[in-house]
Image (cartoon, grey):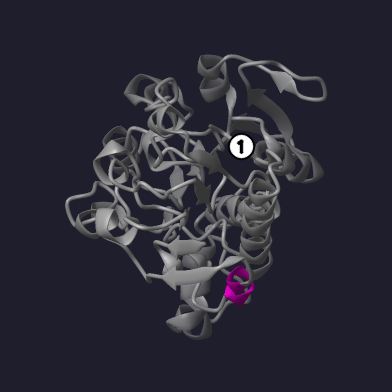
Amino acid sequence: MKIVILDRLTLGEDLDISDANRFGTVVSYDSTSAAESEAHISDADVVFVNKVKLGERNLKNASNLKLICESATGYDNIDVDYCRSRGIAVCNVPGYSVYSVAQVTVSMVLSLVNHLSEYTRFTADGTYTQGGTANILKPLYHELYGKTWGIVGYGAIGQRVGEIAKALGCNVVAFKRTPVAGVECTDIDTLVKISDVITVHIPLCEDTYHIINKERISMMKPNAVLVNTARGAVVDEHALCEALMQGRIAAIGTDVYSAEPFGIDSPYYAIKDYDNVCLTPHMAWGTVEARKRCFDEMLQNLEAFISGVKRNRID
């Protein structure tokens, strides 16, 4: 059996992948461009993938391919319908990054709400030392206690963020297509109107593309902090950055982008140095523990497939 890993570096170069060798011959590429993808998978039996887009264009001649293992929960990079038509099994890894993404999400919110970038700069650049007073209390910052924290997408990650928000004393509301017990569920328009903090944890699909659109951004409070650790395209990036530059919302944080890495033409590039902006390079999912958990789950998906058992199948 030939196993091809298309984008090894997205798993982190520190991750030990040697356990995959017990299943067959492993060929690992640090990265795979769109032009290289067809050749890289041409004789593969199994493909491990994270970001490379897979569909008819590069799968049509992969006659040996039996299984695609996505090293993520989201699988919008894979044409699952085409795979189904070809009899190619597809597995994902649900739930592996819940603690990691929730941790980074809340860290972003706390950093932005507390203006930590400004306050740490005051000590680093000598402003505090030379100021002659015991404390600096500008810019003003507020407690999260008693504020409303809106969660867009209340799956495992959203629920974990909600637990932390409640522990901080926030009133938590959630947008979920199927309302659940234990949290106040509301429609998306109401959520963006009433929330002081909005965090986004919804998967990308046709229905969620730009779910945070220009109209909904215009409904937000001027003190609103929005953090997106889901997928870049669930937010209208141009409208969001424009609102921030015009002072119509207070702060934004994001770990995900419609194009990754984002280029100099991205609306985020113009605001990357703003104090009220926290941009990270799609790292929220990637604690050491989460990446190991992810790869172990991928191997279990492969082992189950070989044994004829359906595990984490999405095809």
Determine whether the residue tagged by mark 1 lies in a helix, strand or loop. loop
Residue 113 percent coordinates (x, y): 57, 50
Q: Foreground residue, 297 or 181?
A: 297
**Would you place residue 209 above or below residue 61 in this image?**
above
**Would you place residue 263 above or below residue 196 in this image?**
below
Q: Foreground residue, 117 or 228?
A: 228
From the image, tell me which residue sits under label 1. 313
Q: Foreground residue, 247 or 46?
A: 46
Task: Please say whether residue 192 is visible from this viewpoint.
Answer: yes
**Would you place residue 176 above or below residue 14 in this image?**
above
Residue type marked 1: Arg
Residue 95 percent coordinates (x, y): 68, 46
Residue 230 percent coordinates (x, y): 50, 42
The reply, left or right, for residue 269 in relation to residue 96 is left
Q: Residue at x 29, y 43 (%)?
A: 245
Q: Quadrant location of residue 50?
A: bottom left
Q: Residue at x 49, y 46 (%)?
A: 66
| Residue numbers of the magenta segment | 16-21
Majority secondary structure of the magenta segment? helix
